[in-house]
Amino acid sequence: MDNNQGKEAARHFTLTDEIFRYPGMDVYTQMTVIVLKCFSTESNLPELVDIAKLGRMNLKQATKAMQNLVEMKIISQKMFRRLVGDFQDDRLSWAAKGLLAFCKEHPHIDLTDLLELSSESGEDESSIRKALTELHQYGYLDEYPVWSQIAN
């Protein structure tokens, strides 16, 4: 490999000391920022398992670091979902995850129909609303405006 090929193959990135100035940002969250900064574009992002490996952490720590970055508004909920997946988010209850799966298959169902269907599972309106609120709180209803209105 000649010198020019070596220069082209090497990736360069800049990282300011800004990440060290966030109060309460733990070392795993800092490492996650560093790993993400190493990749040039959003279309070239690593998988969560790679973030964990490169950041020298386990998957749980990497997921928590990604959650912290969303809460600090450093990365978007959409990016988080793309990297972590809808059902690996441990902030969501099983009820919310189940409702999200249903939501993906029936994006235009209204509250009346949902409550009618929920009676088959033994869930009441308050537990459905609680799961919807949870999904709304963590940005999972952004692409489902009908469901988002119900959650408010």
Image: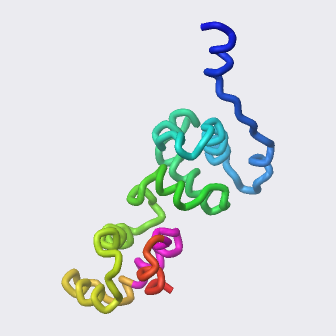
Q: Residue furthest front?
A: 4
Residue 76 placement (x, y as % from top left): 59, 59
Q: Nearer the viewer, residue 146 or 53?
A: 146
Tell me what residue is drawn at x 77 percent, y 46 percent: 20
Tell me, yes or no, whether the highlighted magenta stretch contains residue 141: yes
Q: Is residue 134 above or below residue 149?
A: above
Residue at 70% across, 30% down: 12
* Magenta region, main secondary structure: helix
Residue 21 covered by magenta stretch: no
Report the magenta residues as a range: 129-142
Quadrant of the image containing the N terminus? top right
Query: Image quarter for residue 15?
Result: top right
Classify residue 132 by image quadrant: bottom left
Q: Position of residue 30 (x, y in %)?
A: 67, 45
Left or right of residue 125: residue 133: right
Q: Is residue 103 positioned above or below 37 on the image?
A: below
What residue is drawn where x is 24% and y is 89%?
Answer: 116
* 132 vs 92, nearest the viewer: 132
The residue at 52%/55% (across/down) is 80
Q: Nearer the viewer, residue 22 or 139?
A: 139
In the orientation shown, which residue stands out farthest toward the bottom?
112
Up-down relation of residue 73 to residue 34 (above or below) = below
Where is residue 68 shown, x and y percent of the image? 61, 57
Q: How is the image coloured?
A: rainbow
